[in-house]
Amino acid sequence: MLSTVAVTDDHRQFPKRFDYAEAEPRLYQRWRDADAFATAYGPDGANVDASKKDAKPYVIVIPPPNITGRLHMGHALNNTIQDALVRFKRMDGFDALWVPGTDHAGIATQTVVKKQLDAEGIDYRELGREKMIERIWEWRNQYGHAIIDQLVRLGCSCDWSRTRFTMDDGLNQAVRHSFVKLYEEGLLYRGKRIVNWCPVDRTALSDDEVDKADEKGKMYHIRYPFEDDAEGGLIVATTRPETLFGDVAVAVHPEHPKLAQHIGRKLVLPLQGRIIPIIGDEHADPEKGTGCVKITPAHDPNDFEVGLRHDLEQINVMNEDASMNDVVPEKYRGMDRYHARKVALEDLDEQGLLVKVEDHTLAIGRSYRSKVPIEFRLSDQWFVKMEPLAKQALEASGYVHGEDGWTKGDGESQLNLHPERTEKIYLHWLANIRDWCISRQIWWGHRVPAWHHVETGEIVVAMDEPEQVKANPDQWRQDEDVLDTWFSSWLWPMSTLGWPERTPDFERYYPTSVLSTAKDILFFWVARMNFAGLHFENRMPYRDVYLHSVLADESGDKMSKSLGNGIDPVSVIDGATSEELKAPVLAARPPDMKQRLKRIEKNFPDGFDAVGADALRWTLVYSVNEGDFVRLSLTRFTEGRNFVTKLWNGAGRIITALRAEVERGTSGAYAEPTDEDQWLLARLDSTIRDVRKGLEGFDFGAVGQSLYHFVWDDFCSWALELSKTRLTSDDDAVRRGALRVMGSVLADLLRLLHPIVPFVTEELWAFVVEPMNALDLWLDRKPSSELLIRDVYPEPRQPPQPDIEARFAILQRFVVKVRQVRASANVKDNVRPVVLVKALNDKTRPMLEQAKGAVTFLARLDDITFVDAKPKGVIGAYDEAFELYLELAKYVDLAEYLGRIEKELDKAKQDLASAEKQLANKNFVDRAPAEKVEGVRQRQAELASKVEKLAKDLEDFGNLES
RNA sequence: AGGCGGGUAGCUCAGUUGGCAGAGCGUCGCCUUUACACGGCGAAUGUCGCAGGUUCGAGCCCUGUCCCGCCUACCA
């Protein structure tokens, strides 16, 4: 079996590992140099890629990361998904565009720069608005691109020439345009309302910017004496005694059996001495507390409503930083709210008015940014009326309003949410929407385009400084507030493409195709983008929304900065020392810090080895599911790395064989595909179908599993092993035939995998394409590009081939059966027995004969001989398609093996009994579909025969115990 | 309180119209077999949360129930 030509078919020449650290930057640069992320049409509307002149656009606009952010695992997941989709569609013939950009992140950024100034000993308020904004721009220009650089490390194929920033001029214009338009339509108003107020950042917050959680607190029962009876009075229960200075009434339920009689009487407000009325209002729930509620309109949203109903004064008792203001008695002025509470309680106690204090769990809202409990504060703010916008969104989702509220109508939905069940959550929110407070009392952001007349209070809203302001600048001042960051984000899919201008980009690429984002900003952002798209352009800004799961650590805790349990994607790509792994935990100082640190020390005493971007991406895609959480641990990424290495080595085996063939200089004839080849092609087709379906349906976990199975099991474990005998054949045509199929399948496999693991596939692509071209051995589908990123996504070649798969399954079961017998009987690998086979159907013999060389290689046999009956003195193993016999006694002690047969016999008996029982059930035979019944009959026959044979074997070897 | 999910092998999770319970990791053997030890071959492992119901047949459908998570609202 010597090869006739001496060639260097030396597999050791192919590197054992993919050197991602070296290759990733090199390959990324190649893509950039080749303009591989560019669209078919430029921003001027000119066609720049003639081959995609008629291609349909496929557009994703990135959820803009904050300029203050560092890439976290959630970004890595979301951007991997987007990149996979864009690369898939780009290869599949679409004019794909992925618009990147960043968000100015109002409060977050201002806070970062404020801290920087604090460190320099500069008070930003003294610095003044203009200088402060200048400093923030400086900061942004210096640090604001860090996260973009990290997206590059991930391999994201964004069109960087179209990078946007939410504070760009164009986007600012879009913001002002939408503000003015909404104002003119009466959907935007200014009003005095109770808002969530952050005393640290001294700004209003939207409801979404407040994190609510149950916290332990106290409930204080305070007696408010009657004006006409100092010993009597009503007992009010409150958790906020320090706000009592702002009380303007005490409410009881108008039909309260005992308390209603007091309505109209007056009370003396403790500590303050002010006289306040007792009013009747249904807000006072007789079941709760003492049944008496103090009414503080300026510090509680419910009380605010009560106050409006009863025309009560609104008394604000706090300053912007939540210290007590001049309304309160002198003693308390300037005290922080909690200090004031303590002192007030002491004083009440002294006066005998503090009746009772009990433990109480209450929901405390904290600013998501400063983590400080928010204050309800009465102030002038800008609001967007949400109901009309939500109505439009509900209708766009095919809902109609009727007597039962909103219900699904006959109309088609313009929006598909994935996973589907999120739609219910979305609609529920839409149906219960509240107005959106969009003004923020900070400096960094889009300034409210409104001017107030200094004397009259008249308000003018306009895109640019209005004429009357220009004429009398001293009479007017521009509104001091800036807009909520989300007020620019909600326009993002439109504004990044040039809206409100009708730019060529906007005309061609809007509406976009898909929005992919984390589940937790469905309301913050997705819903509002829907509103903006529908309201301003009368259509959804995208057709599909994919909401990925939230990432959690291995014990199921959501990855968060405050727990320090996040895994840094860059640490995964580049590796990290044990100390670096510990850093986030040490920074966060969570309650279980010690355990977390210990775990890191134990599991990663020498740190974590770099695994590269592909392994990171692969692991994320492979792990994602439709649940609420994806649990990840560092070891999962090692598994991803193993997969990349497996692919690398499997491909390497074919590549070295291809190179060897090029060296041999063969040409011309090749053998036609064998049965094994047909099977592999059928498996490839089915994988292509799965992967396409998964990508189209946002079922990324299924995509990963299908590809994993194909690469590891079908391609490497079976096809590659089976091909070895042919690849080392001395018959040119046989070798070339095998290479033709294996090379072509490998190329398709790289195409299939590329959207998920772009680097390793791009690297291997060149290695495969070059020799395949040289040998001219393509089965079909010659590459259309030197770069895989530009090549074409595979389509199935044939419909499903159940016959071929069934035939090949016989081969697989045969090999496995022999291996099982060998393993359980301890037959060493260097022992090469002859196996005797009796075929039980007409497929078995042709299949095994055709692939005999390969099968004997896989099962480590000397030969396969076909027989018509079982000879004496052999051990049998039984399958529905064949019986195989081995002269095991020749090689090993049989005693061990017989135990195994007994077990197998027991199992077969059990299965047989169950099949028989089913067939004895008249109902089953009569009612079940005929094919099901037939299937069980067949199984029963096979099992009966198997039981018989195994029992006889045991008997023959005289070891039957039962 | 309401809404939405989830409970399947030691762990993380699949389970596509109801028809013989699956994968990866981990575990246990054997193997430095010429792509890969980041590997190969083989093995073990289940009250499908619990209780009913529908059905010839339920992990899957229905009812109830217990846990866990998330969201929304309220909390004097």
Image (tube, helix red, strand yellow):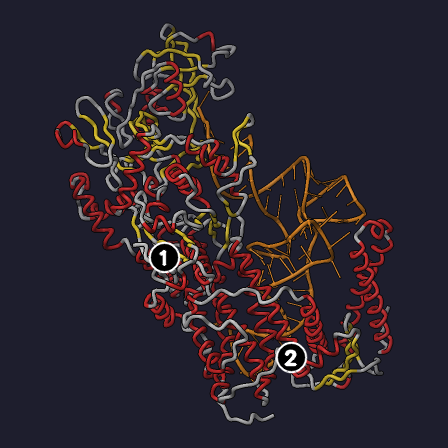
Describe the element under mark 1 as helix, strand or loop.
helix
Which residue appears at 44% of the width and 64% of the height? A604
Marks 1 and 2 in Cβ contact (< 8 Å): no
Q: Earlier in the sequence, mark 1 or mark 2?
A: 1
Q: CA distance from mark 1 to mark 2?
A: 49 Å
Residue name at image x 62 percent, y 68 percent: A682
The disc label shown at residue A858, or none: 2
- Using the image, tell me which numbered label, if any, was put on residue A583: 1
How far across and how far down the image is residue B71, in percent?
Answer: 47, 39
Q: Is residue A227 left or right of residue A113?
A: right
How many circles with numbers are drawn on the protein? 2
Along the horizontal axis of the image, is A763 left or right of A450? right
Numbered badge on residue A173: none
Callout 2: helix, strand or loop?
A: helix
Measured as percent of width and height from the top left, residue B19 is found at 73, 55
Split into 4 quadrants, where in the image is the C terminus of chain A?
Answer: bottom right
